Image (tube, rainbow, N blue to C red):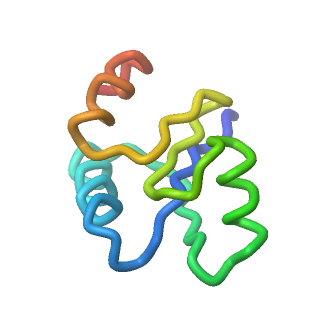
């Protein structure tokens, strides 16, 4: 079984809220990781993406960083999930 895509988020981030809501409506499961107040998770996100902005997604090694729903849709289409 493949592991779930990892979605790095920050509480109160409007883009994060929109992305989580969109994924929920589309029934796309992700592992949400809150990076605020979690130095280890923040470091992992920065190591993966080269930046500290959320949301950031790691889907089987392919990273989409600092995005909104408009950028997420084509990324998901490439994965064949929307």
In the figure, 12 relative to 7: above or below? below
Instruction: Kindly give the residue lying farthest to the bottom in the view shown.
Output: 37
**20 on left or right of 30:** left
Residue 37: image x %, image y %? 63, 83
Q: Quadrant of the C terminus?
A: top left
Q: Nearer the viewer, residue 35 or 25?
A: 35
Counting every numbered tag in the picture gives 0
Q: Nearer the viewer, residue 67 or 28?
A: 67
Residue 39: image x %, image y %? 74, 74
Q: Quadrant of the N terminus?
A: top right
Residue drawn at x 59%, y 49% as measured from the top left:
51
Residue 15: image x %, image y %? 29, 59
Dividing the picture into quadrants, the one containing residue 35 is bottom right
Residue drawn at x 56%, y 56% as measured from the top left:
31
Q: Nearer the viewer, residue 65 or 62?
A: 65
Residue drawn at x 58%, y 65% as measured from the top left:
33
**62 on left or right of 23:** right
**37 on left or right of 68:** right
Residue drawn at x 36%, y 44% as measured from the top left:
67
In the figure, 17 relative to 68: above or below? below
Instruction: Kindly give the residue lying farthest to the front in the view shown.
Output: 51
Dividing the picture into quadrants, the one containing residue 55 is bottom left
Dividing the picture into quadrants, the one containing residue 34 is bottom right
């Amino acid at each position: 079984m493949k592991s779930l895509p990892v979605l790095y988020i920050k509480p109160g981030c409007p883009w994060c809220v929109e992305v989580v809501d969109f994924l929920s409506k589309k029934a796309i499961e992700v592992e949400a990781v809150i990076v605020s107040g979690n130095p280890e998770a923040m470091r992992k996100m920065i190591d993966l993406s080269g930046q500290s902005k959320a949301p950031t997604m790691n889907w089987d090694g392919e990273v989409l960083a600092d995005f909104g729903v408009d950028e997420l849709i084509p990324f998901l289409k490439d994965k064949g999930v929307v």
